[in-house]
Image (cartoon, rainbow, N blue to C red):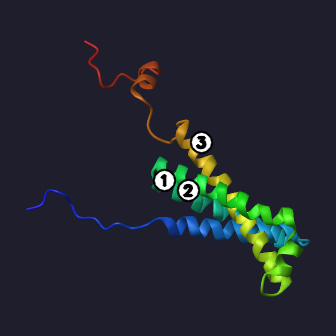
Amino acid sequence: MHDVIPTTLRSDRHLLAVSFACFGVAGAAGATADELGLTLGATVLAIVGVYTGARYANRVSRRSLATNALVLWSSFLAVSATHLVGLGSVSAVTPGPDGAVALGLTVLTWATLLTACAATTFLGFREYGATVSADTPEEQVLEGDTSDYSTR
């Protein structure tokens, strides 16, 4: 008999992918939006991106979250280099319609930036102990909750 309950390993990367996609679409829509409806839609997508990013950060280890944040920041720096050259210049030398290439680079830039910011923020929350757990034993004693100890 086995003493360990078998569990299936599953990846939580789908949450990171949903967050990445929401941030990309929200960033591109918010940057080009002139209408209130598009701005509200972009805001809702950004909120969904933060929510799924928070769920992802809650399910992975600190090390994994730190590694992902570092990779996302490196990706953002690599993608933002295309903005230094100019989106028009980049889209002129790449195959495909110029507008689609420029829009794709804009979506990729916003997605990497906002996902990297979210991952770094949630990593900071985790590092500095911003949790919703119960009070520590020291805090319970300071507040007068001594139910674990006999008063006799």
State how far apart marks 2 and 1 are (Cα): 6 Å
**Dot 2 amino acid type:** Asn
Do the CB atoms of the residues marked 1 and 3 lie less than 8 Å apart?
A: no
Give the residue at mark 2.
68
Q: Note whether 84 is above or below 25 in the view shown.
A: above
Mark nearer the N terminus (2 vs 3):
2
State how far apart marks 1 and 3 are (Cα): 13 Å
Q: How many marks?
A: 3
Is 109 situated left or right of 33 in this image? Answer: left
What mark, if any, has residue 92 been given in the picture? Answer: none
Task: Give the residue drawn at x 53%, y 58%.
Answer: 55
Q: Quadrant of residue 104?
A: bottom right
Tell me if mark 2 has few (under 14), some (14-19) or many (20+) residues whose alpha carbon lies within 10 angstroms of its own. some
Q: Residue furthest right?
A: 34
Mark nearer the N terminus (1 vs 3):
1
Q: Nearer the viewer, mark 1 or mark 3?
A: 1
